[in-house]
Image: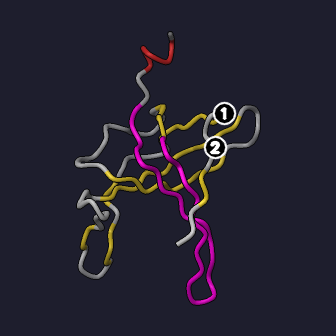
Amino acid sequence: MRSIPVDTSQMVFIAAGSPRPKVKDRTTGEIKYNADGSPMWQLKVLAQVEDNDAETLLVSFPATHAITARLGTPLTVQGLTAIPWETNGRHGVAFAASSVAPMDLRKAAE
């Protein structure tokens, strides 16, 4: 599957909800794991570049446990990639990150 790296150096990310486990099979509720065996999570994220309109992205990421984020939490998103997909005549772009974490506001102020 082709993935496209996303330059996030000029982007601001804010949680647009709380993280939830990424479900592999909706009928059984089976949770998806990555190749390293870490559970995958999903989080709706508001992404904005300077004064442009913000976009809402659903970002998947691995984490051993849920991150502490809720609506409005500033986030650090690392290793963001866009993954184009097409299935049964439908198409779109999925987003994945190597990590998503609440921003340390003390470090950001320095």
Q: Main structural element of the magenta stretch: helix, strand or loop?
A: strand
Residue lying at 44% horizontally and 16% vertically, measured from the top left = 107
Tell me which residue sits at (60%, 80%) in the image.
Answer: 86
Q: Position of residue 21 (x, y in %)?
A: 31, 59
- The amino acid type of the residue labelled 2 equals Asp
Does the magenta portion include 82? yes
Single out the residue that lies furthest toward the right.
Answer: 52
Q: Quadrant of residue 52?
A: top right
Residue 31 shown left or right of residue 7 in the figure: left
**Crowdedness of circle 1 by 10 Å Cα count: few (<14), some, many (20+)?**
few
Secondary structure of the residue carrying tag 2 is loop
Vertically, is 15 above or below 35? above
Q: Residue at position x 31%, y 78% from top?
A: 25
The image quadrant of residue 106 is top left
Task: Using the image, determine if residue 89 lies above or below residue 39.
Answer: below
**Residue 55 versus residue 85: which sits nearer the camera?**
85
For disc 2, the marked residue is 7
Q: Disc 1 residue type?
A: Gln
Q: Which range of residues does the magenta coloring cover?
A: 78-102
| Colour theme | secondary structure
Estimate how packed mark 2 is, as few (under 14), some (14 to 19) or many (20 or more) residues with alpha carbons within 10 Å: few
| Disc 1, SS | loop
Q: Provide residue 100's location: percent of width, then percent of height.
A: 41, 42
The reply, left or right, for residue 4 in relation to residue 64 is right
Residue 94 percent coordinates (x, y): 54, 64
In the figure, 62 relative to 92: above or below? above
Disc 1 + disc 2, Cβ < 8 Å: yes
How far across and down, in percent of the image, does residue 16 sit? 49, 45
Taking the image as shown, residue 1 lies to the left or right of residue 55, namely: left
Q: CA distance from mark 1 to mark 2?
A: 8 Å
Q: Which residue is mark 1?
A: 10
